[in-house]
Amino acid sequence: MAQLVVGARAPDGLFADLKPPLADTLVVTEAARCLECGGPYAAAPCVVACPADIDVPSFITAIAQGRTREAAATIFAENLLGGSCARVCPVEELCEGACVLAKEGRRPVEIGRLQRFAADWALARGFRFRRAGVRNGRRVAVIGAGPAGLACAGELAAGGYAVTVFDARDDFGGLIRYAIAPYRQLRDPLPEEVRHIGELGVEFRMGTPVDRPDRLREIEDGAEAVFLGIGMGEDVDVGYPGGSLPGIWNSLEFIEAIKLERAPAVGRRVAVIGGGNTAMDVARESVRLGGEEVTVLYRRTEAEAPAYLHEVEEAKEEGVLFEWLTNPIRFIGEDRVQALVCQRMRLGEKDRSGRPRPVPVPGSEFVIAVDTVIKAIGQRPRTEFLGWIAGLELDGGTIRIDPLTGQTTRSKYFAGGDVVNGGGTVVEAVRAGKIAARGIDRWLRAERP
Ligand code: SF4
């Protein structure tokens, strides 16, 4: 695979926030636009749309009335990663997309930026909103310090459980830390949120890979329940000829290099392979890194692309080009990648995913000159690791669970986040961690009183 890191430290300001914080002077005015929908018989649409179940009108009203600390308490009561989610949530698809103002054709309340304001305000002052529960003498292991694992661990610790989190990485956050595009969140406020979770009594064993069956067995033997928040594995590599040439990146490597403030040198012409949200992120980051001709190649049409519509539109506004119905088949280059041989596709019958299958058009090959290629095709399931857990049923490589409890088919194991949904949002992972924490609590009380 490509060099891990090239290029120099990113110039200051290159990765400025995609959605900068609201100016203090605008916060109250923006909060006052909220109509405080909902009531005793029906929740506000923004609350219904929030996977973390945050009481949006309550916290916005508190901001409007100058009770920022209460606003933050409302946010963190439901989401221990409320500051991170305020930055990385696709609010256009969730709370803001559901806001009644948007439904009336007006600008929705800027829920994400208001949440960011309250969360940052409180975290900067060291306020804490959750307390460690009275210890119940029961021990739970969490594998993975990403959003699902952190949410599950924090909720269990607040409920009195002794929780140990294991993660191969030295730093916390999983995909928030390493895979979310830096223009959404570089790092803060994650360290402070994790400190908060640690103060609930969660023990972190970072730099501890669970990379052998005997290590997993040891963890399993030392806990009454185990939560798997291990995410997905490496990027899918379809193995195109020439794929090992320098200048070809996997999307996760690419984002991680930028997140660690060692920005890749992308050259003038960048090709991004894939049609999902990660492809949009790496394309837009490539524009920021100086790519003058950044082109996304996707094998179906825009209508089938898994990326959110607004992400595609914003990428276009930033100058990203799109070649739909295009599939790369070979890389060309000597010392580094110089061109990509592609083939035109047409849509055929529907496949298992319900989308029309892309079918190659014979004789349609063409060549695109490139300096850098970034593959954003998806991630592999962690099949080897999951194979160590007897009785664990998978569904197309991801773990099958009871959606109401997070429990897997191996009763001691619970799971949530990307390892279950194949790659979702941070806030969906938080929700999954919360559901599993409640599921573990109920199961242990019932089965092992
Ligand atoms: S839907 Fe919009 S206006 Fe209604 S409570 Fe939510 S944020 Fe306020």
Image: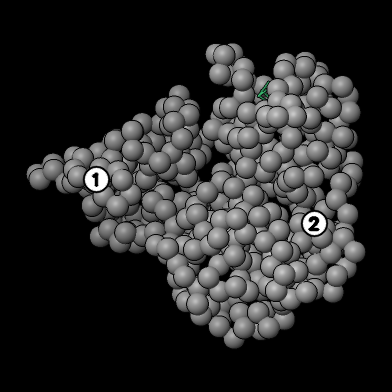
Is 312 on the left or on the right of 82, as rendered? left
Of 271 and 98, the residue lying toward us: 98
Q: Position of residue 437 (x, y in %)?
A: 70, 60
Kindly identify which residue carries mark 1: 350
Q: Is residue 112 above or below residue 165?
A: above
User: In which image quadrant can residue 380 be found?
Assistant: bottom left
Q: Is residue 273 above or below residue 111?
A: below
Label 1 element class:
strand
Q: Position of residue 267 (x, y in %)?
A: 42, 42
Task: Identify which residue is drawn at 56% across, 46% down.
Answer: 425
Residue type at mark 2: give it.
Answer: Ile
Task: Identify which residue is drawn at 51% across, 80% down.
Answer: 390
Q: Residue furthest left?
A: 363
Task: Identify which residue is drawn at 86% across, 31% down.
Answer: 68
Q: Position of residue 130 (x, y in %)?
A: 85, 50
Q: Is residue 18 visible?
A: no
Kindly identify which residue carries mark 2: 197
